[in-house]
Amino acid sequence: MKGKLYSRRRIRLPDLRKVNSFKIILLILFFTIITCIIIFLKTSYPVLKATCETAAASKGNKIVNDEVSKVMKDYTYDDLINIEKDVEGRITLIKANTIKINEIVNKINYNIQKQFDLIPKITVYMNMGSVSGISVLKNLEPNFEVELESAGSLQSSLRTEFKSCRN
């Protein structure tokens, strides 16, 4: 009986000279595009984020100011604060009408939240110069349109401060 000799198949690496040059160009192009996208996103993201935050804060401040003005036009200082004086006309006690103040705060919060819920989207437009940081490109197309959706909840707090004032 003759013994059989087993051997492994040789693994051959591709000959780089035989690799299609088109595949190499395609691979280089792919990595170049990916690198450009990563660099673009790293440089433009802070500008994009700051612009969006500014637009959202501006819209939020406008809504808050409008709603506070609408609610507070129905109230006076005397509705919120009771001042007691002695027989000589000196102030002895300043007392806040907390029930009325809480009612106002709740009304303002409700109105603000209602207005935020009505905002469909906030649209921010940015040009190539703003996004890339290259000032030469400021007036060039394309303009990027970023749409922001409102999300979150409203938190408010009330602070009062009394200071003594002597003539």
Image: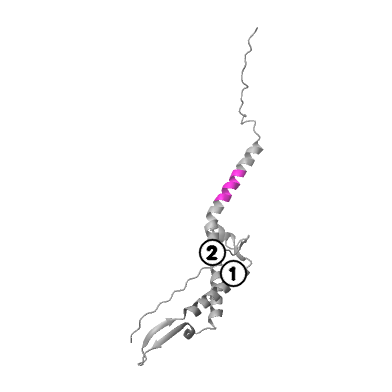
Which tag is nearer the camera, tag 2 or tag 1? 1
Per the rendering, the mark at residue 53 is: 2
- Which residue appears at 44% of the width and 85% of the height? 82
* Residue 31 falls within the magenta-colored stretch: yes
Choose top left, top right, bottom left or bottom right for residue 9: top right
Per the rendering, the mark at residue 116 is: 1
Q: Residue furthest bottom?
A: 87
Is residue 2 or residue 74 the one in the foreground? 74
Q: Tell me if residue 118 comes above or below residue 35 in the rendering.
A: below
Q: Tell me if residue 24 comes above or below residue 43 in the rendering.
A: above
Q: Residue furthest left?
A: 167
Choose top left, top right, bottom left or bottom right for residue 55: bottom right
Is residue 57 or residue 135 the one in the foreground? 57
Q: Position of residue 54 (x, y in %)?
A: 53, 66
* Residue 45 falls within the magenta-colored stretch: no
Let me know if residue 136 appears in the view: no
Q: Position of residue 7 (x, y in %)?
A: 61, 18
- Which residue appears at 40% of the width and 83% of the height? 94
Q: Position of residue 145 (x, y in %)?
A: 62, 62
What's under tag 2, amino acid-wise? Glu
Per the picture, the main secondary structure of the magenta-coloured stretch is helix
Q: Residue furthest top?
A: 1
Q: CA distance from mark 2 to mark 1?
A: 15 Å
Give the magenta-colored segment's residue range. Answer: 30-38
- Which residue appears at 37% of the width and 87% of the height? 91
Callout 2: SS: helix
What's under tag 1, amino acid-wise? Phe
- Quadrant (top left, top right, bottom left, bottom right) of the C terminus: bottom left
